[in-house]
Image (cartoon, helix red, strand yellow):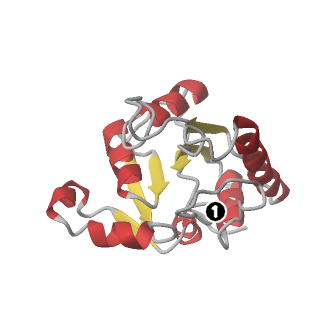
Amino acid sequence: MNQKLIILDRDGVINYDSDDYIKSPEEWKPLPGSISAIANLTKAGYTIAIATNQSGLAREYFTPETLTAMHQKMLNLITTAGGKIDHIAYCPHGPNDQCNCRKPKPGLVQQISQNLNIPITTDTRFVGDSISDLNAALKSGCTPVLVKTGKGMKSFVKLKQPENSHLKGIAVYNSLSDFVNTLVTPK
C-alpha cells in the first residue's frame, strides 16, 4: 500500500511567522484556512508530518516545554477541525551547529520517513515558504511546493535568481489552503 505523505513547514505555512520568532503559545496564530486545509488532507487519507527549524531553542528564546505547548495548541486546533498530524520533526539547533537536521539539509525528512515507516518518493510533497524548505525537499527526494504566505513572497522572487535555477518550474500557490484545494475537494 502506498501511503500519501504530505510534509509541511510550520512557521509561515501553518501559522503566522515573525522575524522575532514565535516564542509562546499566545504568539502562535494559525494562518487563515490552514487548520481546515490540514483537516481536509486528513479526511482525504493523507498522512501529514511537519518539518520545522526551531533555532529559537538554541538561541534560548523559548524552552522545549514552551515549544511543546505551542505544538499542543496547534494539534488541538487541528484535532477539533477533524484533522491529524502524524509526526512533528524539529531541528533545535542554531545555524552554525553543523547538524544534519537543519533545513536545507535532509535530516528532518529522513526522521519523518523513519518514524512513520513511509518511504520518501517524488509523490511526497513538501510544502514550504522558504528556499531552504524547497532545497530540503529536493535533497530528500520530495516534490517541493512553495506557498506565498510567511516568507513565501520573498522566496518567490528569489526563484528567479541564477543560484536557484534548480528550482525552476516548481508548483507555487498563494496559501496552504489553495494547495490543498487542488488535491482534494473540501468537505
In this orientation, which residue lies closer to the viewer: 99 or 85?
A: 99
Q: Amino acid at mark 1?
A: Asn
| Res 22 → quadrant | bottom right
Q: Secondary structure at mark 1?
A: loop
Q: Is residue 54 left or right of residue 130?
A: right
Residue hosting label 1: 15
Image quarter (top left, top right, bottom left or bottom right) of the C terminus: bottom right
**x%, y% of residue 28?**
71, 60
Q: How many marks?
A: 1
Residue count near mark 1 (Cα–Cα under 10 Å), binned few <14, some 14–19, many ≥20: many
Image quarter (top left, top right, bottom left or bottom right) of the N terminus: top right
Q: Residue furthest front?
A: 60
The residue shown at (67%, 71%) is 33
Q: Is residue 79 left or right of residue 21?
A: right
The residue shown at (72%, 47%) is 71
Q: Is residue 5 above or below residue 11?
A: above
Q: Is residue 133 above or below residue 32?
A: above
Q: Residue furthest right?
A: 80
**x%, y% of residue 174?**
48, 75
| Res 36 → quadrant | bottom right
The residue shown at (65%, 69%) is 31
**x%, y% of residue 155?**
36, 66
The residue shown at (67%, 73%) is 32
Q: Is residue 121 above or below residue 126?
A: above
Q: Is residue 88 above or below residue 25?
A: above
